[in-house]
Image (tube, rainbow, N blue to C red):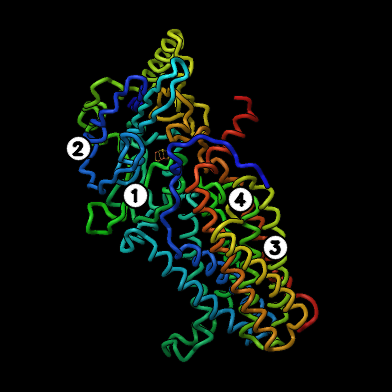
Amino acid sequence: MVPEAEFTSYYGRPILKASPWQDDIPAYLFLGGLAGGSALLGAGADLSRRPALRRASRLGALGAIGLSFAALVHDLGRPSRFVNMLRVAKPTSPMSVGTWILTAFGPCVGIAAAAEVPRLVPRPLRGLVRRAARPAGLAAAALGPAVASYTAVLIADTSTPTWHESYRELPFVFVGSAAAASGGFGMLLAPVAEAGPARRSAVGGALLELAASQRMETSAGLAAEPLHTGRAGALLRASQALTLAGAVGTLLGGRSRPLAAASGAALLAGSACTRFGIFHAGQESARDPKYTVVPQRERMAERGD
Amino acid sequence: MARMGFFTDTSVCIGCKACEVACKEWNGVPDDGFDLLGSSYDNTGGLGASTWRHVAFIEQPAKANGDFRWLMESDVCKHCTHAACLDVCPTGSLFRTEFGSVVVQDDICNGCGYCVPACPFGVIDRRSGGTAVKNGGLAQKCTLCYDRLGAGMTPACAQTCPTESIQFGDIDELRARADARLRELHESGVAEAQLYGHDPDDGIGGAGAMFLLLDEPETYGLPPDPVVTTRDLPDMWKRAALAAVAMAAGVLGAFAGRRG
Ligand code: SF4
């Protein structure tokens, strides 16, 4: 048992403000990862002629990015003013950078997905969509990893102790989680004969996520504590169990249709739990002045003031 | 234009809360409810979307004579030199004025809320209540009375402060005044007096609102060593780029090798 840290506060009240964000934001972190990973898988499947995996991944990417967009707009204090995001392009604002990445990514994903459902495309546009699908899918794949990783910077670039203190590992946790989720999605929907790359990418992602999370624990110091307590702790324990089970299931039974589907679902659920867990741990770390005062005091002591 | 700001000398604050009232009145900040908080005379709680000046009250056993002492401090936005709220704002609503202060443009803010967790002092917040409330759903905080400054006036809080605990003026001049006041207090035996936010080399590049405190910052609910989060942003982008490359290589690599 670690001894309780001694610190002074103003009536135990928070020093920082927790973000005003609701569950829209962790949902977006998950869906953005799923979309980014699926865009990559879709392009790979396209080039390697795996039509069922291509179709599932392209449509999955579009669905995920559409829901992401809805979540982002819904979380605004003034949703009708969403377009104000497009007034400026600011490298110091990860949200601005992300908006521009999504603005480029969305239409590419849309075109690639439209080619999978030609009957829904107006007849005069069908030929164009068919020809544009591959280049659009490749462009989406080029942007996909950015969509999956910038969200780590989005939350780390705050004063929220748990998010900021884990900024070194968070992008790796997030891309691992994204690869696991999109691989899992492919395994869930594509036949096993085509899903080999989805399985490999899912297992690789799951391992990366688990390893980067481990490292994050040590490097975040005291700010890692909220990752273990309360709702966040429960979510992250669930995430670890689901991700591990999904990876093992994939390795042992990925060639059996029911086992592949179950493992894929476990990986998707694990990825969602990771995002919600990290989100809530951060919120908790902002609400408790301990995580503000104690590390700052330690920093001052090290500097000698 | 010289950079303008506040020096709040808590050693002469009498806790009258005239600053809180004047701020609300002048800026038309809506009522946000009344609560008895059980924290001495502080029933305001802290800075927020509808509280731009907040007077903290602390009752302490005095170290000297076994009696107790009051600490009172009128808190406000620090108008940081390196302001995280402004850095992360994705719409350009938050901007740096010609007076060096940091201000939200209400007609541009879309209420994304990013500035709220970015601020290392927990100052700025999104006003709840939706469109039924004035500027509901938008980020709100002290403007250093931008409208008054434009007309050559003093911010409402400093104007009303009866003890000159809140002083307004040119930042360099205020810094010199703060140094002099600290020396005076130290010479008269108030060893615990310390300045806060006056150092241009601190984690936020110095505040546009500095303080003279009679105890450690955290006693007043202030962070002892605030750092602007964007200081680490170049490093964050580098790590994210590395992760993105790893992901692209990993997923596309999964297509290599034998089929199946
Ligand atoms: S104290 Fe907070 S709200 Fe005020 S300028 Fe600094 S970062 Fe912005």
Q: Give percent across and percent down for residue B63.
A: 47, 19
The image quarter containing residue B244 is bottom right
Q: Chain of mark 4?
A: A
Residue corresponding to mark 3: A210
Report in which chain the residue with disc 3 lies. A
Q: Nearer the viewer, mark 2 or mark 4?
A: 4
Which residue, given by chain and number where applicable, does mark 2 sit on?
A: B26
Category of crowding for the residue at label 3, using alpha-carbon neighbours closer than 10 angstroms: few (below 14), some (14–19), many (at least 20):
some
Q: Position of residue B28 (x, y in %)?
A: 20, 43
- The residue sitting at the front extreme is B66
The quadrant in which residue A146 appears is bottom right
Name the residue carrying label 1: B139
Whether callout 2 and callout 4 share a subunit is answered no
First in sequence, mark 1 or 2: give its number: 2
Q: Secondary structure at mark 3?
A: helix
Residue type, mark 3 in image: Leu
Which element carries disc 4, helix, strand or loop? helix
Given the image, what chain letter belongs to the residue carrying mark 2?
B
| Residue at 52% in and 54% down | A154
Q: Quadrant of residue A177?
A: bottom right
Residue type at tag 4: Glu
